[in-house]
Amino acid sequence: MWRIAFFPLRPRSYSVWMDSIPKSAASVKKILCEAPVESVVKVSGTVISRPPGQENPKMPTGEIEIKVKTAELLNACKKLPFEIKDFVKKTEALRLQYRYLDLRSFQMQYNLRLRSQMVMKMREYLCNLHGFVDVETPTLFKRTPGGAKEFLVPSREPGKFYSLPQSPQQFKQLLMVGGLDRYFQVARCYRDEGSRPDRQPEFTQIDIEMSFVDQTGIQRLIEGLLQYSWPDDKDPVAIPFPSMTFAEALATYGTDKPDIRFGMKIVDISDVFRNTEIRFLRDVLAKPQGAIKAICVPEGAKYLRRQDVEYIREFAAHHYSQEVLPIFLNAKKNWSSPFAKFLMEGERLELTRLMGIREEDMVLIIAGEHEKACSLLGKLRLQCADLLEMRGVVLRDPALFSFLWVVDFPLFLTKEECPTELESAHHPFTAPHPSDIHLLHTEPEKVRGQHYDLVLNGNEVGGGSVRIHDAQLQRYILATLLKEDVKLLSHLLQALDYGAPPHGGIALGLDRLLCLITGAPSIRDVIAFPKSYRGHDLMSNAPDSVPLEELKPYHIQVSWPTDSGEETSSATPSKNLSS
């Protein structure tokens, strides 16, 4: 008798022993031995139990084997461009070029099957348990003011284009007007964001909208949804999730999406230096928004090297035009740094008390405008965490999933290119906080919005808001405050005038959520056929050129710059489209 281990069987990547092949069956042995790796083979025989003591409990098929009778090679596999094993290193470009082969790997199979299971549980929770209606919304729509840049799709009418929706935002609000008071969709969305390393031009949202709901109601629904659909092989999710205002998140963590798995919180130490003799600190505190902020890096004096500290200082100077003042407390409790020698004994004691400084800790101090100082320390907090973990210090447990609600965002932000004008912090349909409505006509920049983000381990995985359901208020915000052309949204404004109920919703980024749950290095590892970071499909070479005659019905002529700077026309793809 001859024994062979044959694996993996597709599509479920199970391994099965094939046993008891008669020595006389030379043709069967030849087929199985000579078939190239990843070939398709048809084997017929009898499934039997393994002999006692030879079972393998680690395999799904570990209790059986096949007593082979015949074998047939259905399709031989040519030489592979790479080995289909997770431990074999491959460039991402090669993986995307041969995506159909990369999908055979254990990790990609696990990621996509887990994605399917979670989506199925989400549908069950929303539709079967909570009465939501799954509604598909159009992909061909019109340009939306504000937000991300949208992809344009030409039509056969000269000069007119569709837009691919960056979200089903308007449609789900219109569904609320239409009486479908609980809407849900696994929605495909599109954003033309150019070359961004971990973004996709097309992505998937778990899109939800409800009538007669408030912020708390939406938060409890999402917590229950995630708890219900959470993978069985992960630690269960504890609810309710903690909540934090935008102002608290910025002041404590320097960001609106804080990673709360570790400390190193920002501390305001302005009071320590109210009566300081250090002149530049006094000058900072004399300014309207002046503050002195600090973080304590545990064992930073022990693990961080001189070049690490220099990198931190150069980063602050280059990106924020800000000076960072590092202080080190060595094992003998001696303070060291050029700045430390200017500190009075009382200032050292108070700083130690406020910051909880211990031996071999490092303190980073920044003096400047409140928001700028907090934002910089938020970046340095994450950089220091990366540096410490490179040295073997465990700060962020990859098996720990720390959800956080961030609420009370500003409704508007000032435009960077024109500080006298406003733009929506979330989107123009977000309702103002009831307590701040009186400020809309006098100090709109101080108005808070009913906007909430869901953060997981320092990544935004969801965002939503209570919407404006009053047409007059929506028109005022669009036309007067945001200076948008209300004609683009005339259909929505008209709908709100026909008895629109109060409503709100949220969208969860499915790709980002799965990426964090699986521990994948990129969202491309949880999408079956993703684009490269430049937005290209390396497998099919999309986007691609089209013949000139196919462009004529759309009244489009393609042109591109020549070496001389002039433009010529052709069907070759380019950056400039005219109709």
Image (tube, helix red, strand yellow):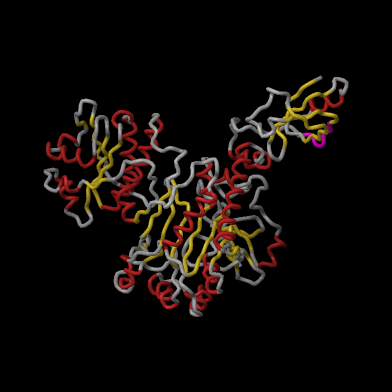
On the image, the x and y values in percent for residue 215 come to 42, 63
Depth check, front residue: 82 or 248: 248
**512 sits left or right of 71 in the view:** left
**423 sits left or right of 367 in the view:** right
- The structure residue drawn at horizontal position 53% and vertical position 74%, both measured from the top left corner, is 177
Depth check, front residue: 300 or 416: 300
On the image, the x and y values in percent for residue 478 come to 43, 72
Above or below — where is 443 with respect to 30? below
- The structure residue drawn at horizontal position 27% and vertical position 39%, both measured from the top left corner, is 364
- The structure residue drawn at horizontal position 67% and vertical position 54%, both measured from the top left corner, is 545
Residue 351 falls in image quadrant? top left
Above or below — where is 35 with respect to 208? above
Q: Which residues are magenta?
A: 71-76
Which residue ends up furthest to the front in the rendered image? 52
Which residue ends up furthest to the bottom in the rendered image? 498
On the rendered image, what quadrant is the N terminus found in? top right
Above or below — where is 553 with respect to 322? below
Q: Main secondary structure of the magenta part?
A: strand
On the image, the x and y values in percent for residue 129 come to 56, 59
Q: Is residue 313 magenta?
A: no
Depth check, front residue: 16 or 576: 16
Residue 164 falls in image quadrant? bottom right
Which residue ends up furthest to the right in the rendered image? 24
Residue 325 falls in image quadrant? top left
On the image, the x and y values in percent for residue 53 come to 68, 22
